[in-house]
Amino acid sequence: ISTSNDKNTADLVYIYVQEKGGRGSISDPVDGVSVVDPYVDRNGAIRFELDVERPEYVPETYGAGKTKSKATITYDIYVNGRLDDANKTYSASTGEGSYRVGPLNDALDPEKDEIEIKITKVVWDRITVLYEDEDGNTVKTVAGKTTTDIANDTTGKNIGFTLDANDYKAAGTYTVTGVTNDPALTGSVTVGGGGTNIRNAVPAGDDYVRVVITGLEAAAENYDVILDNNLTKSAQALSALDLDFAVPTAAGSLQLAIGNSRNDNITGLKPGDAVIMTATGSENLAATSPVGYKVTVSVDGVEKTITWANDNSTISTAPTWRVTITDHDVHVKVVKIEAVAAPQIKSIVYHDNNADGAISETATADTFVVTFTEALSAVPTITKTGTLEVDGQFLINGTDQEDKSVVVYTVSAGTVAAEKPTIAAKQIKSAYAVNIDEFTLTIPAAPQDLASISWAKTGA
C-alpha cells in the first residue's frame, strides 16, 4: 500500500480478485468505494460490483434538478504482475452497481491468471461548503444568496455568501480552508447588501470547503408582536375568534379589532422599538339585551377592557397599550368575555329631617337615600306623581369624594303621602350596563309608616 497522496488521489490500495475462477482478495473501502465479489468469468473477463458510500463532505444532491453526486473511480489492472490496462474509470453515485471489465488484450484464464486491481484515485464531483466562526460554530447565512456546494475540479469556482443584518451587525475577515489555493483565500466580510464574493476556489477534494469568518458580532435578537385568537386589524366577530372558552351567544356578533401604530410592521422588531396597540369594538349591543358585555384583552400580560353597554350606544372605550420591545415576542390575546349585569336598587332609607312625621319640604328638607349595587354613570331621575318633587345628587363622603353608588334625593316640593313616583327604564346605568326596567317607589300614606318606603319593578 502506497501512502502518497496528492489532490483528488486516494491512498493507493491493492484489490485482489477473490477466487471464483481467478485468485484474489477484497480490499478495504477507498474514499467510500469498495469492490465487492470480484472474479474472472469463464469468458476471461473480470466482473465485480462497486459499493459506493458518500463521504459526509459530499452533498447527496446538488442544483435545482437535485442531481445526485457522483464519484469517478480510477484504477489499473495487472495480470500476473504486469500492467495490462491503466487509468480505467467508472462513474458511480451512492449505492451499488455491477460492472464487467474485459476481455482484455488476451482473454484471461480463470485457472492460471492472477488478477490485481489497483484503485489509484476516487474523485467526487461536488464538495459541500460550510460557513463557520473561528470556534467551529455554524454561521447563519441567507438562503438563496449563499453557495452551498461547488464543483470539485481544478478550474476554480466562485463562492458567494450573504450575512443578514438581522443576524449580525459586524464581521471581520474570512479565510477559506479545504482548498489548494496559494496564496490562501482571505478577505473582508460584508454584512447585508450584496454579500461577500470569493473567486476561484479550488477544492482539495478530501474534506469540506470551509469559509471561516472571524470578528462576528451578533445583532440584537428580533421579536414580533403576535395577534393570537385570529385577531386582526380588521373587525372580527367574537364568535369567529379562536378562543379556549365559550362566547355568550348574545355577544357573538359583537366585533373586535386590534390596530397598531406601525402600519402593520410589527415583526422583526428590536429591543427598544415601541408600538402602540389599540383595541376597538363595533356592532352596538341592542338595547333589549338585559346585560352588557366586557371583553378583556391582554397585551404582553397587561389587561384592559372594552365594553358594550346594552343601550345601542357607540362603543366609547378604546384602550391603548404602549409596548416597548425587550427580550421576547409580545402576544395580544382575548382572555375573558363577561356578561355585565345592570345595576339594581339595593335599599332606600327615608330621613325625616324636620321631624314633622311627614314627607315635606322645609328649611331642613326630608331626604331619600337610595343605595345601588354599584357605581352609576349618572344620577337617575325620579319622575313625580302629584305634587311630590325631589332633586338628586351623589353622596359626598367623608373625604369630599362622590360615592356614585349612593344617591341622596332631597324633597323640593310637595307634602303628599301615598304617592308612587317612578325611576324610568334605562335611568339606572353604570359604565357597563343599563337597567332596562322601570321601578316604582311606594310611599306610605301614614307618617308613622315612612320607614317602610318600598320599591318594585313596575308591573311586577
Image (spheres, rainbow, N blue to C red):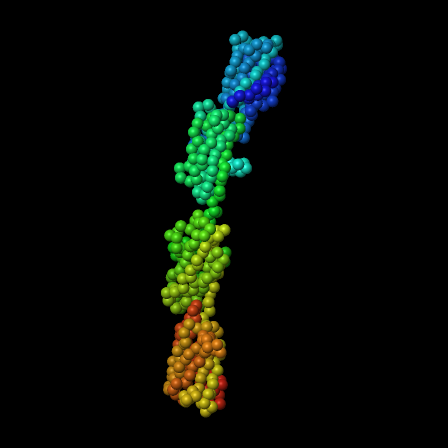
- Residue under the image location 49 percent in, 43 percent down: 218
- Residue under the image location 47 percent in, 26 percent down: 183
Q: Residue 224, relative to residue 133: is it above or below?
A: below
Viewer-closest of 348 and 404: 404
Q: Is residue 284 left or right of residue 302?
A: left
- Residue under the image location 44 percent in, 73 percent down: 376
Viewer-closest of 202 and 262: 202
**Which residue, as the protein is rendered here, is positioned at the far bottom?**
356
Q: Quadrant of residue 142?
A: top left
- Residue under the image location 45 percent in, 33 percent down: 187
Residue 254 picture location, percent across and down: 41, 61
Residue 105 picture location, percent across and down: 52, 8
**Which residue, as the protein is rendered here, is positioned at the far top?**
106
Residue 357 picture location, percent across and down: 46, 91
Viewer-closest of 259 and 284: 259
Viewer-closest of 42 and 64: 64
Q: Residue 439, relative to residue 313: is it above or below?
A: below
Q: Residue 92, relative to residue 239: is it above or below?
A: above
Quarter of the figure that contains the N terminus: top right
Quarter of the figure that contains the C terminus: bottom left
Residue 58 picture location, percent across and down: 51, 29
Residue 396 shows up from this direction: yes
Residue 60 shows up from this direction: no
Tally of numbered tags: 0
